[in-house]
Amino acid sequence: MSRGSVALLLGFWAGACAARGHIATPAEVDQLLQAQGLAASGRITVEGPRGKLSARVVFGVARPDSLRIEMPAGTGLRFLLVSRNGRLRADLPGDDAMFEGPGNRETVNGLFGVNVAPEELVAAILGDPPESMSAGWRFDRNLPAQITIHEPSGARLTLTLEEPILAAPANRAFEFGPPRSRSWTLQEMSSRLGLRR
């Protein structure tokens, strides 16, 4: 992404709602571009034509396409998504159920209602969104505090970050666990996640 494009995006986000920190400077976006990954706790909010989903998460990304999203429950995990090397797996430990399929736009759209492939999401988080979407970053104390991604269908994904680490998680974070006793369809998994329609 050129510096001119970054400046244009930064100007676009100047009118965004108030949030912690400040709109990222070009130097701060460069910091993201140089990072091999990012890990943080925080909140994910997805808003789009299919509804809204908002949840506490712990997540990590690593170039080029590794993604891990955990939604904690009271005593463990409510939901786990891992994507790597073109494959994606979504687990609901409480139901001992899983979905496994291609790590592509169709799968992510089926789960969350955002038409973004895992590698596009990783690139956008790390400062280089594909031309088909726009992204804005806020920084606080020299670290990313919020990332907002708009994709062409009108959906918006916002990650609000706490305690971010600008480094890729260990490779084992992106490994699939042992199979669950139940294998669900993409639609069954999406419905159980509770995306409001």
Image: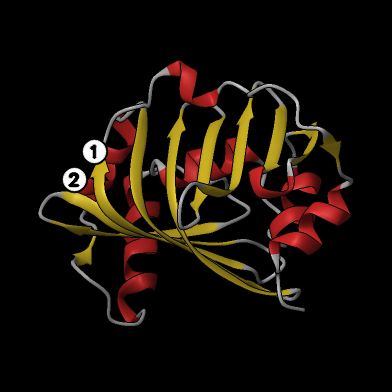
Please report the residue visible at 32 percent of the width from the left and 64 percent of the height from the top. Answer: 10
Residue 159 position (above or below residue 30): below
- 182 left or right of 51? right
Q: Closest to the observer: 193 or 21?
A: 193
Q: Residue at image x 51%, y 45%?
A: 70
Element assignment for label 2: helix
The alpha-carbon separation of the residues under discs 1 and 2 comes to 6 Å
Residue on which disc 1 sits: 31
Q: Looking at the figure, which quarter contains the N terminus?
A: top left
**Residue 72 versus residue 88 in the image, above or below:** below
On the image, the x and y values in percent for residue 173 come to 47, 25
Name the amino acid, label 1: Gln
Q: In x, y percent, where is residue 180? A: 76, 31
Mark 1 is surrounded, within 10 Å at the Cα level, by few (under 14), some (14 to 19) or many (20 or more) other residues, namely some
- Pointer 2: what residue? 27
Q: Which mark is residue 87?
A: none
Residue furthest top as drawn: 171
Q: Position of residue 98 (x, y in %)?
A: 76, 39
Q: Are the residues flagged by discs 1 and 2 in contact, CB closer than 8 Å?
A: yes
Q: In this view, does 56 lie above or below 186?
A: below
Q: What residue type is labelled 2?
A: Ala
Query: Residue at point 20% right, 55% down?
Result: 25
User: Which of 110 and 25 lies nearest the eye of the viewer?
Assistant: 110
Tell me where residue 192 appears, x and y as whole percent.
Answer: 76, 61
- How many residues crowd mark 2 within 10 Å: few (<14), some (14–19), many (20+)? few
Q: Quadrant of residue 57?
A: bottom left
Relative vertical location of residue 147 with respect to residue 165 in this rendering, above or below:
below
